[in-house]
Image (spheres, helix red, strand yellow):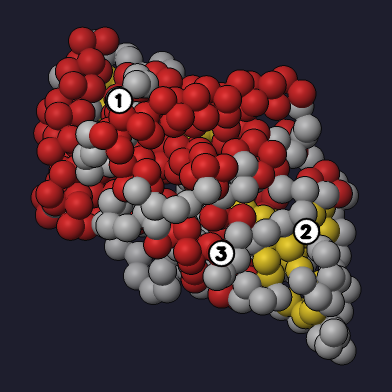
Amino acid sequence: MTVETTGAGPVPAADWVTIPDLHADPYPIYQRLRSIAPIHWVPAVNRYLVIGYEACHTVELDQERFSADETGSLMKRSMGHSMLRKDDPEHDVERKAYGGVLRPKAITQHWRAVFERSVATYLARLEDAGPGADLVSEFAAPYAAENLRVVLGFRNARQEDMQRWSQTLIDGTGNYADDPDVWALAERSSAEVDAAIDEMLPVLRADPDASLLAQLAGTPMPLESLRANLKMTIGGGLNEPRDAIATTTWALLSHPDQLASVLAGGRWSDAFEESIRWVAPISMYPREATRDTELAGMAVPRGARLGVVVGAANRDPAVFTDPESYDIDRRGKPHLAFGGGNHFCAGAWIARASVVSVALPRLFAGLPGLRLDPARPAVVGGWVFRGVTDLPVRWG
């Protein structure tokens, strides 16, 4: 095997980084690391964190050197071996099996009406909870969960089940602290999802609809792969739109001048894209080096476990001017919040349609005077998955 490390320098170590500090606020940590190098060995998470934009982009586009099929993957343990932890051609075969279920034509024909029903239901729920209510738990989370439930085809589940499954499964995927309680909850949800899938497959074969489960029921995909791919979709398919709604709302309410521009020009897409750059819902994902190689001028050994930190790459000052600020007028290179290359997020169209076209405009139109609760600040957390977990709001 060719060694590609001639002339490459060593990767610096950052043994001062801790998981609690990353969870609380990773961005000052990324700034400090970036001032030294775009890649660091971080013992606390047992992997090389890739934080530079160009380095992250290189990894995304080169599956020959950087495999998604990571040894000892937390996602495999939590959700099973989904397409997200496979390289082509296996990944491509399973991704194509999704057909057009998550694409714009299906959104227009089937899912836009679902989004409209959901937003009416959960906007009313937020209003009923009254000023001071948490926008995440009363609106963003159940809205995203109900949309996902219908799109996936879980007639035998509730949106509350989707929320529980998604959170516990992604908690397992991000369980770098190896907390046994986190694993127990993930295993319970995994078994519940398996049972729900097994119950629905014969139903949807006999009475198919436009859902993803109905689509997959008619393919030769092995059952274990089908289960793993549905769990992967439950994870990302819920937390991305939920967190995009909450982060964008928080950002706009914190920047009244930008909110005024959005309201005046219908600039919901600009607000959405900037919010997921600013706080990427899926902020880190793993890769594994397939050979001794060079990345960003540094030597990466074969078998190295990498963390592709798009949450840091999206704030790289070499690419984005004043990257720590929220700015809907930002232009330039695209963010990496939806990944790239062959693993570009399959749910990106659904996320954009449900958040940009429906949730955000209906939320701000339906609650005039929407504002942050001055007595209860927003709570933000996470580094593998990051988002606003509590967002008390007032209106009227």
User: If you read the primary sequence from the N terminus, does the residue marked by circle 3 or circle 2 appear first?
Assistant: 3
* Residue 155: mark in rendering: 1
Quarter-of-image position of residue 237: top left
Q: Are marks 3 and 2 in contact (CB under 8 Å)?
A: no
Residue 77 in sight from this viewpoint: yes
Report the amino acid beneath label 1. Arg
Q: Residues within 10 Å of mark 3 (few under 14, many from 20)?
A: few
Report the amino acid beneath label 2. Arg
Q: Are marks 1 and 2 in contact (CB under 8 Å)?
A: no
> Which residue matches tag 3?
90
Report the amino acid beneath label 3. Glu
Q: Residue at x 34, y 48 (%)?
A: 218
User: If you read the primary sequence from the N terminus, does the residue marked by circle 3 or circle 1 appear first?
Assistant: 3
Q: Residue at x 27, y 57 (%)?
A: 100
Quarter-of-image position of residue 209: top left
Q: Quadrant of the N terminus?
A: bottom right
Mark 1–mark 2 Cα distance, whole angstroms, equals 39 Å
For the residue labelled by badge 3, is the local secondary structure a helix, a strand or a loop?
helix
For the residue labelled by badge 1, is the local secondary structure a helix, a strand or a loop?
loop
Q: Residues within 10 Å of mark 2 (few under 14, many from 20)?
A: many
For the residue labelled by badge 2, is the local secondary structure a helix, a strand or a loop?
strand
* Residue 377: mark in rendering: none
* Residue 305: mark in rendering: 2
Mark 3–mark 1 Cα distance, whole angstroms, equals 29 Å
